[in-house]
Amino acid sequence: MPSVYIETYGCQMNVSDSELMYGKLRSEGYETVDAPQGADVVLVNTCAIRENAEQRVIGRLGELRRDLKPGAVLGVTGCMAQRLGPRLLETDTRVQLVVGPDAYRMLPALIEGARQGERFSATDFDLEEHYEDFTARRFEGVKAWIPVQRGCDYRCTYCIVPTTRGPERSRRLADVVRETREVVAQGITEVVLLGQTVNSYHDGTHDFSDLLRAVGAVEGLRRLRYTSPHPNDFSDRVIAAMAETPTVCEHVHLPMQSGSTSMLKRMLRRYTREEYLDCVSRLRAAIPGLGLTTDIIVGFPGETDEEFEETLSLCREVRFDDAFTFKFSAREGTPATRMPAEWTVPPEVVDARYDALFATLRGISRERNMARLGERLEVLVEKEARKGEGLYQARSRDFKTVLVPGTPESVGTYLHVELTGTTGATFTGTPVAERHALPMAG
């Protein structure tokens, strides 16, 4: 059988798309392999959200060219492929395929043509495509990423996603429930629902609250998560569904981006500082013990010292459990690139603000984590830890990372642990109850 290797960059949606591509190609007789050396087909599934993500891919393509065996097909898929299209074929003569997120159904035919020496770019949007007949090849047996929505209609001024993923469209609720039942039957007990603004889901009949209740009721499911929501779409119905569905985990990743109303307006986020705080208040009132994480951009065009200080003050007020922080990256085709040149924040100022924000967030996270030492909670063991012999990474329902002693057989088990230490970002935990083993996918 011909072999295929896919290297994935970017968000969980890209991970899910790689699983779909692997599944489709396996159904067409391809063998999946874990390294590019010797593979007949090498696909790089890409991200375009920031400039450094694209530069990393370009560098990686150069490395892969040296490793390819004679006659192997090299292709670029995903958001960077969608954004650059045929330009990738023009700038890199070794790349034979450029395939956007709505064209994965064509992969077997495109690869066959490339093996005959042809070169293709397939980047048309298909607003009906949800790959319902694909069987994903899951990367792990602990959790399943399940897309429920593709594309985005919000059009924030810094964001390339509407260009690379197209307009928002949602899968039918029944199809999402069916896929959930399938993965639970394979032994997977945690599901993560994916969408660019996942809580704006609507299939024409059902909204996100209906989806949470229906998926959460699937027999055998123990944990239900979702990412990433938009603050504007947390209706009372959605918050009630979270609070009343036992399988929904007590964690929300709530992108903030800035704590300044004037900055949020330039970003076209469609909410104010006060409305964001109100959303946080309603979520915390309904869901005791809620873990709250966020995204924040530093150095967006026109950001003043006062606006940045408003971001710091909002972080101190909300006291996030953790945050992903980013330096603004201008993306071709977004409205932010057309803002006045004099609004550009000098790189040294961006660096200083980034460091200040990081220090503020880490200080808050450490304070919150130190206060939880001695607490006992349930964790799901996910994988071997990157550091520490005999340690495994586990996750609590409120999305805390806990390192626990274990063995390869521990992966996929639930433990009750006591939190015994913290680095400020993660915990160490000591098991205090017997493992409850779960059947693994396979």
Image (cartoon, grey):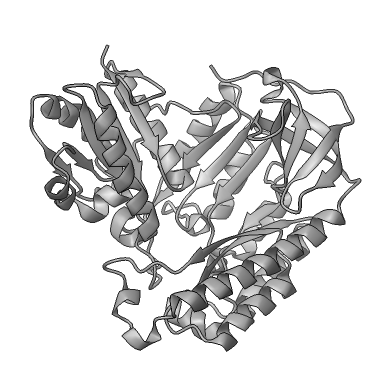
Left or right, 274 with respect to 267, comes to right
Residue 323: quadrant of the picture: bottom right
Q: Position of residue 431 (x, y in %)?
A: 85, 30
Q: Position of residue 410 (x, y in %)?
A: 71, 22
| 137 shown above or below 96 | above
Q: Residue furthest top?
A: 1
Q: Nearer the viewer, residue 338 or 38?
A: 38
| 306 shown above or below 115 | below
Q: Position of residue 415 (x, y in %)?
A: 79, 30
Q: Nearer the viewer, residue 353 or 392?
A: 353
Label count reads: 0
| Residue shown at the point (15%, 44%) measured from the top left | 121
Q: Is residue 340 visible?
A: no
Left or right, 227 with respect to 157, comes to right
Q: Position of residue 389 (x, y in %)?
A: 72, 27
Residue 420: quadrant of the picture: top right
Q: Is residue 136 visible?
A: yes
| Residue shown at the point (44%, 37%) measured from the top left | 175
Left or right, 269 with respect to 131, comes to right
| Residue shown at the point (15%, 52%) measured from the top left | 87
| Residue shown at the point (80%, 23%) measured from the top left | 435
| 428 shown above or below 23 | below
Quarter of the rendering occupied by the N terminus: top left
